[in-house]
Amino acid sequence: MLLLPLIASARKTLYVTNSYFVPDDDFRRLLTDAHARGVDVRILTVSDNTDVKTTLWAGRSRYEEMLKAGVRIYEYQPSMMHSKTFIVDGMWGSIGSMNFDNRSLAFNNESNLVFLDAGLGAQMNATFFDDISRSKEIILSEFMKRPWYDKVLERGAGLLSRLL
């Protein structure tokens, strides 16, 4: 109930930071639809420096579709990243414990602070861009060249995504 209006209301920017990013079909469609209407959609998530590899692989199994649709994806490099934020048009968003995966959205008791404040939005945007300066952007042409065994792991984890 929180993510739908956040994503659907975006007109200029939508910046998502999430350590367990495994969006289902509906949320991938919302993200790609936002980009199609001119929104700068960027996702910051974990790299191999994660505590849950299956979630990383399941999330990567969704990258190709989103990259082809124009969504920009970054993986944080220095260490495990555990942030969970959404920033919409630099004005409103969410900070909390909610992950972008099925378990968090359907089962876990999560707690988020939702804000509508241009000052906090500006601070959140600055933090987001500081974080992506230490991240690797996933480029579709490079991503397509990853080893076959990575694709197998991602496909397998993707099939289990409803349990993650």
Image (tube, helix red, strand yellow):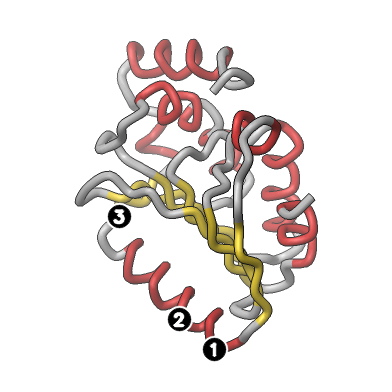
- Neighbourhood count class around disc 2 (C-alpha, 10 Å): few under 14, some 14–19, many 20 upward: few
Circle 1 is placed at which residue position? 119
Q: Which residue is mark 3?
A: 135
> SS for tag 2?
helix
What residue is rendered at 65% in x and 67% in y? Answer: 114
Label at residue 123: 2
Give left or right: position of 150 versus 13: left
- Crowding at label 1, few (<14), some or many (≥20) Cα neighbours within 10 Å? few
Alpha carbon distance from label 3 to label 1:
25 Å
Q: Sequence order check: which comes first, mark 2 or mark 3?
A: 2
| Percent of width and height locating residue 96 | 54, 57
* Quarter of the rendering containing residue 35: bottom right
CB contact under 8 Å: marks 2 and 1:
yes
Q: In the displayed image of the protein, which residue is found farthest to the bottom?
A: 119
Element on which disc 3 rests? strand
Circle 2: residue type? Gln
Amino acid type, mark 1: Gly
